[in-house]
């Protein structure tokens, strides 16, 4: 039997990060006037690489985003390409969107970077036909630290370049746009009916150690996996099995913080499988508390193992043989 690698994406605000990813190698030195890769490096210089996410906006999402923005999306906005910086520890650091806005004298081209809390870390303006001050550090630094809760209103959240309020508002639309779009795409889902909500596991944080890589996380999960197996073999107590199932669900929450070892261009599926895995474990733990060993809980556990195997085939590079680990 094999205990494998699944997925989960929780946007520690973002990203969950939920990603359709394709690896993009970094080229050259950080240079915000150079190639797209160099511009990305200027925004997240500590990133080891960037991966892409190309979500598809539905007509309903476009309508909702435009309503919240108070402006129409440009044609390229409707097919956004998000760039996810990956750290040396193989964890997402935030996201970047090359964003344009319609200024009084033409298109303003730039980029916006967000951190994992959903806060603006950088706004860049690369091309424009406005006063140079709208691309200056003094003006753009006002947006740093702003988030979805800000309205990006002149005189409230930032000061316009004197005499160029329309151009200043156009630049402000870029960070507002990436925030509204990222929340609409990655963070907002249909709320479940109260009866279907899955409670968060009640395992203290101190019992969930931090790990630096996916293999280390999987090693932590093995003991709890066998605790449940041994319970069904009547070698362990019900209480220990329930605690192990809840711990596994908590560990599962962390899996999508790491890049999938294989098929990295299918991260959306990776995230979906991990969310499904975590939810199934919590339902299983609740059923164990109520029923103990039963046909129902055995079926639930078999379904979890099947899901693990399915994810393993798609995203792990090698099998983890639990019987000989």
Image (tube, helix red, strand yellow):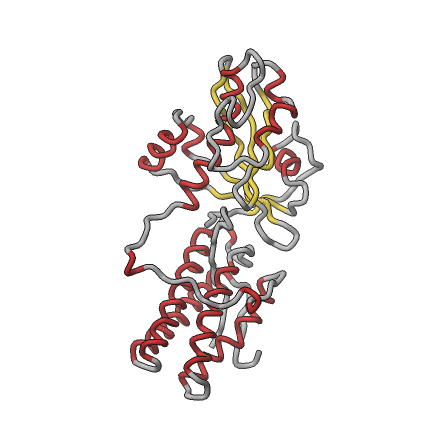
Q: Is residue 49 visible?
A: yes
In this orientation, which residue lies closer to the viewer: 217 or 208? 208
For the point 54% across and 55% down, the residue is 257
Residue 258 image offset from top left, x and y in percent: 56, 56
Q: In the picture provided, is 238 more to the left or to the right than 137?
A: left
Which residue is the extreme one toward the front?
156
Residue 68 image offset from top left, x and y in percent: 38, 31
Q: In the picture provided, is 257 more to the left or to the right than 18?
A: right
Total residue callouts: 0
For the point 39% across and 70% down, the residue is 304
Q: Is residue 175 above or below residue 306?
A: above
Q: Is residue 189 above or below residue 280?
A: above
Q: Quadrant of residue 72?
A: top left
Q: In the picture provided, is 4 more to the left or to the right than 28?
A: left
Q: Is residue 199 above or below residue 111?
A: below
Q: Is residue 135 above or below residue 255?
A: above
Residue 76 image offset from top left, x and y in percent: 44, 29
For the point 48% across and 69% down, the residue is 248
Which residue is the extreme one toward the right?
29
For the point 48% across and 31% down, the residue is 176
Residue 122 image offset from top left, x and y in percent: 60, 34
Give the position of the C terminus as an image quadrant.
Answer: bottom right
């Amino acid at each position: 039997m094999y205990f494998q690698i699944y997925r989960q994406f929780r946007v520690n605000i973002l990203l969950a990060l939920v990603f359709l990813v394709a690896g993009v190698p970094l080229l050259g030195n950080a240079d915000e006037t150079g190639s797209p890769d160099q511009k990305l490096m200027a925004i997240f210089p500590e990133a080891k690489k960037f991966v892409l996410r190309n979500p598809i906006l539905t007509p309903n999402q476009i309508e909702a985003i435009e309503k919240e923005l108070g402006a129409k999306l440009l044609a390229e906005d409707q097919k956004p390409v998000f760039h996810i910086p990956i750290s040396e520890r193989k964890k997402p650091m935030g996201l970047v969107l090359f964003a344009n806005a319609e200024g009084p004298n033409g298109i303003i081209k730039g980029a916006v970077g967000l951190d994992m809390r959903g806060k603006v870390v950088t706004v860049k303006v690369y091309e424009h036909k406005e006063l140079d001050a709208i691309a200056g550090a003094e003006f753009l630094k006002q947006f740093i630290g702003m988030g979805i809760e800000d309205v990006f209103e002149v005189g409230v959240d930032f000061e316009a370049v004197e005499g160029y309020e329309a151009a200043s508002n156009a630049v402000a639309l870029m960070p507002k746009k990436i925030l509204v779009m990222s929340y609409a795409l990655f963070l907002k889902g249909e709320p479940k009916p109260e009866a279907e909500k899955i409670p968060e596991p009640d395992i203290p944080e101190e019992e969930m150690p931090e790990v630096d890589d996916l293999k280390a996380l999987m090693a932590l999960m093995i003991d709890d996996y066998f605790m449940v197996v041994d319970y069904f073999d009547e070698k362990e107590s019900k209480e220990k099995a329930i605690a192990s199932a809840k711990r596994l669900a908590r560990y599962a929450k962390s899996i999508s913080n790491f890049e999938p070892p294989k098929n990295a261009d299918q991260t959306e599926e990776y995230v979906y499988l991990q969310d499904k895995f975590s939810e199934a474990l919590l339902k299983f733990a609740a059923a164990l508390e109520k029923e103990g060993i039963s046909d129902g809980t055995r079926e639930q556990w078999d379904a979890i193992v099947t899901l693990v195997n399915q994810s393993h085939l798609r995203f792990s590079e090698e099998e983890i043989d639990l019987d000989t680990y």
